[in-house]
Image (tube, grey):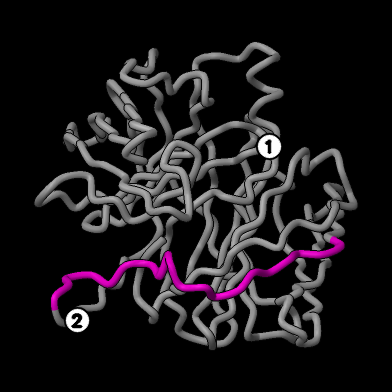
Amino acid sequence: MFFSASSIQSLISLSQTHPRSHTSQTTTFKMHYSSILALAGAAFAAATPAVTTARAEGTWTLQGFVRTCNDTANTCNYKFNLKDNKSGRVDACDFADIADSTRKARWSSPSNLHCAANSTVYVNVGYDQPGNFFVVVPVNRETSLNGFFGYTAAELTDGSVVTPDHTSPSLVVETWEKKKAAGAAVIGRTATANLGAWTVEGLHRTCQTSKISTCNYSFQINQNDGSKKTNCYLTQKGAPTQSFYTAVCQKQVDWVISWGYNKQYGFAVMTVVNVPRQLDAFFGFNDVNFVTYFPNIGPNPVYAL
């Protein structure tokens, strides 16, 4: 994950068009999304920012997606074309994830991978172990768009082109803020530093659709560092299927929450942001419109904004 310390992380809708719909795939997609690397930035200008829903600018297609891993070298190469179906622009991506001894390239979640030299597109990959599933998140820093593409592990056979191509909405996520420093045009996410791990405990989500549609969220944030747990309460107007970001916990203005809902597969990803410390973490929940009380999720790794 990446972006400057002056922006907060916002998680948006993971809606995705996938041409296959048989039961086995649907079951596979329903899983904990602890490792999704969802990329979005929204400038934090006040202690109580307005909640913003995600807006689709158009659609993107990942054409000819191929992943080839070398377990001996602990690397995976990714190659595909990213096509903007509205503008017609095509970015040819060809990059490698070179893992160190702390992880396996084939089964991990690399971030901030440059699509190609001189490209404005960066790519993040989120691996979900329980579901054996990957989410690929291209981010165009120039146009402030990103998209979410899901692949089962079975689709990513070494050296084989995924067919058919996957298409996803391209989502507007406000303005990317870039921080310049010596030797780097853009400062990336601190992916290797040990920043701790957080747990979302006791999520209770209730929605009512009579009169004014509203969803209420109640949970605790455990930073697992001996500090007191933070109680977070949110009330969001809108349909139970909506996504939102930059919602401030009531009476806890240091904490900002985003909620990205995938209608097709019924899961959601919560982004928890500590604004003063410029840290965030991600948490996945299944069957969100069929369940009221959710199990604790975490501890999940914390990232620097």
**Image check: 253 left or right of 95?**
right
Q: CA distance from mark 2 to mark 1?
A: 39 Å
Q: Position of residue 192 (x, y in %)?
A: 43, 67
| Mark 2 or mark 1, whichever is nearer to me | 1
> Quarter of the image holding residue 57?
top left
Along the viewing direction, whichever of 92 and 78 lies nearer the viewer: 78
Q: Amino acid at mark 1?
A: Pro
**Residue shown at 61% from the left, 15% from the top:** 21
Magenta segment's dominant SS is loop
- 186 is within the stretch colored magenta: yes
> Quarter of the image holding residue 187?
bottom left
Q: Position of residue 189 (x, y in %)?
A: 38, 67
Mark 2, other Cα within 10 Å: few <14 / some 14–19 / many ≥20: few
Please give the range of residues in magenta: 183-202
Residue 255 drawn above or below residue 120: below
Residue 165 drawn above or below residue 106: above
Along the viewing direction, whichever of 250 and 185 lies nearer the viewer: 185
> Quarter of the image holding residue 215?
bottom right
Q: N-terminal of the two: label 2 or label 1?
A: 1
Say the numbered circle drawn on residue 69. none
Say the numbered circle drawn on residue 130. 1
Say the numbered circle drawn on residue 181. 2
Quick one: SS at disc 2?
Answer: loop
